[in-house]
Amino acid sequence: MRIAQDVTMIQSHRYLRLVALALSTIILAATRATAADAPLDGLDAYVAKAMTDWQVPGTAIAIVKDDTIVYAKGFGLRKLGEDKPVDAGTLFAIGSASKAFTAASLAILIDEGKLNWDDPATQYLPTLALFDPYVTRELTVRDLLCHRSGLPRGDLLWYGTTFDRGEILRRVRYLKPEWSFRSRFGYQNIMYLAAGEVVAKTAGQGWDDFIKQRLFLPLGMKSSCTSVRELSASDNVATPHVKIEDKVEPIAWRNIDNIAPAGSINSSVTDMAQWVRLQLGQGAIDGKRLVSEAAVKEMHASQTVMPKDENSERLYPDAHLLAYGLGWFLHDYHGRKIVEHGGAIDGMRAQVALIPEEKLGLVILMNRGGTALPTMLMFHVFDQFLKTGTRDWSGEGQAWVKKLEEQAREAKAKQEAERAKDTKPSLALEKYAGRYADELYGEAEITLEDGKLVLRRGPAFTADLEHWHYDTFRAKFRDRTIEPQLITFRLDAAGKVATIEMPGLGQFKAQAAK
């Protein structure tokens, strides 16, 4: 009987211990859940207010922590004037955040032994030539990805032109360097186009198909695409917006297929969260390895040192060091390494960012161009998880933008004040009409229509020319998203127009009439 009582007592104690253990496990799990949720407290309200303050129509955000999507939500509207809300599945342009996909594509091919980071680029693109023959010979696959070619951006070679990818790379030989090869950081989209063509040549399939088959498909990024031409297949697409004369307005999507490896991917935060998980997983996700850990470390490692200037001081005020990896910007923040890349294309902004040691990452997509809000929200979210203070990043960013806007107004006022009054063009207007050409940027045409000069360059740039002073005219573009610019006609010794000087394009030479 005593033995039975002892056994019963032991069993009772064991039961109580099990109950206590179960309760403590439940409490611990609840505590952990509360801790995980705590950084998200108030985020919805902060985002909503920031969107109103920055005049952003729609935003979507996803946050990954410890390989789990802890937040995925949309705010606002896909298009102003329409009652269609943004959600976590809404498609946006991710712009230059696409560059990391191109770098990862090359990493996959390197893992397969098909090329190396430091192979000459001309080994795969034998017709590629840059302005300096030495740079052509020494340029490597790695150089294509880390913005140290010495070339200026030259974006008007592809933006709004009819040049295809091959023609852009053929013409880049005429783009004159602005500094020495590998001497400093200089952001360069065309080199990423070249990197995408290396992918195509090595893989035996186009960059677009490689991205879809080797990254989108295994990651389950089912709604993502590499061209605006594919957006019609979805009924959940955000419309781009820009601010024109102090009013935010919807604009058309811009086709940038000709520079695709540098920035043409369209995606949702739901899809992009899988990309973030892959990066935080050092190239593996759900037990599948897509990229080697060594290759991911190389992409996340400093390749080109970036000096801090006024803009970077504003964007990264707490950074001690700035650098560029392979498809990623790198900097420090409160003792942690940040791996991130933004994206900006007509009417769209994006931000993808990781803190690898915290297993924390996020993606922010917006349908409003010309706004720094994604970067501000990135730091706000990181502050909540790192518990690094209650700094109002949105408010500080707004103050900075207002200062920049005031500086822009002052610059315009100064330009107007310096305008010479009561001058006339040297020639009759019809004498300025004709065809002009540049070996890099192609052709421009000026015609006389209804007594006024009209400038045309490619399908995107049509401007009415208004006399400014002397032989300088102000080009007012019919696409209202493009700021007016001053262009100047230069006469030769015979008094005929020899060249046109255009901002960002240099000199277009007059062509003989055919």
Image: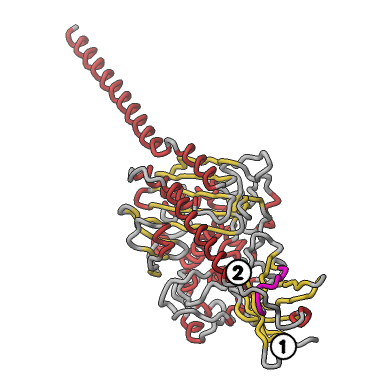
Q: Quadrant of the N terminus?
A: top left
Residue type at mark 1: give it. Answer: Lys
How far across and down, in percent of the image, does residue 462 sit? 72, 68
Q: Is residue 359 above or below residue 449?
A: above
Label located before the other in sequence (2 or 1): 2
* Residue designated by label 2: 204
Q: Give the residue at the far left of this rendering.
A: 2
Residue 440 visible (yes or no): yes
Report which quarter residue 465 is drawn in: bottom right
Q: Which residues are magenta?
A: 462-470
Q: Secondary structure at mark 2?
A: loop
The residue nearer to you, when weighing 259 against 126, is 259
- Does the magenta run of residues contain 181? no
The x, y position of residue 199, in whole percent, is: 55, 68
**In this picture, residue 308 sits left or right of residue 53:** left
Q: Position of residue 432 (x, y in %)?
A: 74, 80
| Residue for point 38% across, 55% down | 338
Q: Which residue is mark 1?
A: 496
Estimate the x, y position of residue 452 in percent, counting from the top left.
Answer: 77, 72
Q: Quadrant of residue 299?
A: bottom left
Distance Cα–Cα, label 2 vs label 1: 51 Å
Q: Looking at the rendered structure, which numbered label has been put on residue 337?
A: none
- What secondary structure is found at the residue carrying circle 1? loop
Indicate left or right for 135 with 14 as reference.
right
The amino acid sitting under disc 2 is: Gly
Q: Residue at x 67, y 54 (%)?
A: 251
